[in-house]
Amino acid sequence: MRIFFVCKRRPQQRDLIEHPYGRFCHVPRALAMLGHDVRVALFSHSRLPAVETEQEGVYTTSLDLLTLGPTRVLDTIAAQVGNFRPDWIVGCSDAWVGVLAQRLATRVRCRLVLDAYDNFEAYMPWNLPLHWLWRRAIRAASAVTAAGPQLADHLQCFRGAGRAVDVLPMAADPQFRRRDRMECRAALGLPPSNLLIGYLGSWSVSRGSSLLAEAFARVRADHPQARLMLSGRSPASVLRIPGALSLGYLPDDQLPLLVSALDVACVVSAETAFGRFSYPAKLCEAMACAVPVVATATDALSWMLGGREAHLARPGDAGEFARKIQQQLEFPATDYGPQLQWREIGARFETILRTAR
């Protein structure tokens, strides 16, 4: 098959040209390894120069809407699609990308598949025209995939009876694997004897992150040597939390070391339009590194953890979250069952495309 992916250049605030990662990178590569002809077009709006690359059998172009202008970008991508003559166009990473993918698929008369890893409508809840266009694209697509069953059920409401939304899960990138904790701490210059409670994900009050500050304070009352381990950009108020320790932004090759250095990894979410359908890659990474996890018991995170109660705390309950951290410190649990790899997920995607009606 000839498969053309359309995607944002910077989903989840990471540049796919500089740092290929996740489903946006590994699903196309897995399809190329299966013998398919795969192209990827990435879109940015940060005045970035156009880029062309080829890695692991996948040819990628990146176009910037501010540098070239919307009309020239659309003409360029339409010409690429027309020359490639794909069997499938895949729209992923955001609602507006899905709308663009539908228009391209209609223009060249090929089949459309939309992939959602989040509830994209929660990104801009005020943008009702975009929501309407996104839902229309879902109805028009020959196939739709979602990162978990809760999101699949949500999208099914717009899809229509008899046209299933398939589940295409998240996974950890290959560099995330079990490592020696003390060796990882030494490599990052972290204290060898402190208890490191790591926060995984972007710090956001709307996503329930503030609960962790209260939970950590309770844990630290019993374990004064505990540290709240942070990375990336954290608000100044978070950095002032007693016991907080931040490494800032780390190179990609050091992120697996940080995860493996933790005593407990925390994944916090909330019962919101976003949180109910959030399947964070950070949780996959912690499980792949065999690190004890405590996560908010949303339906999505509970599904990812196979319903393992030892790892789940009721949404909004800082006291229970603290108790679950304490339990993992005393009785670490790291058996999460078999972990899917991106090559397996790519094979699933191939089957979805081959069997789509």
Image (cartoon, rainbow, N blue to C red):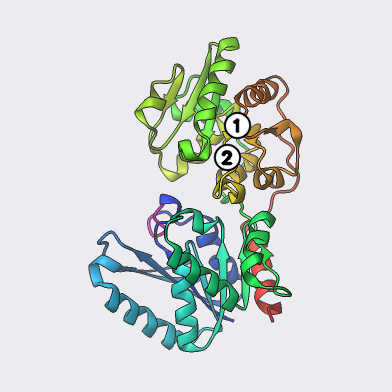
Where 87 falls versus 296 (above or below)? below
User: For mark 2, what is the residue?
Assistant: 270
Location of residue 141 in the rendering, given as x and y in whole percent from the top left corner:
58, 77
From which residue to which does the magenta span run?
14-18
Looking at the picture, tell me which residue is in the foreground, 10 or 339: 10
Residue shown at 63% from the left, 74% from the top = 143
Residue 207 visible in the picture: yes
Location of residue 288 in the rendering, given as x and y in whole percent from the top left corner:
64, 43
Label 1 with label 2: CB-CB less than 8 Å: yes
Residue shown at 31% from the left, 62% from the top = 45
Residue 356: which quarter of the image?
bottom right
Say which quadrant the C terminus sits in.
Answer: bottom right
Tell me the number on the disc at residue 172.
Answer: none
Say left or right for 196 vs 14.
right
Tell me the number on the disc at residue 316.
Answer: 1
Q: Amino acid at mark 2?
A: Ala
Looking at the picture, tell me which residue is in the foreground, 288 or 271: 271
Residue shown at 59% from the left, 32% from the top = 265
Mark 2 secondary-structure assignment: loop
- The local crowd at label 2, few if under 14, some if 14 to 19, many if 20 or more residues have their Cα within 10 Å, is many
Residue 291 visible in the picture: no
Mark 1 secondary-structure assignment: loop
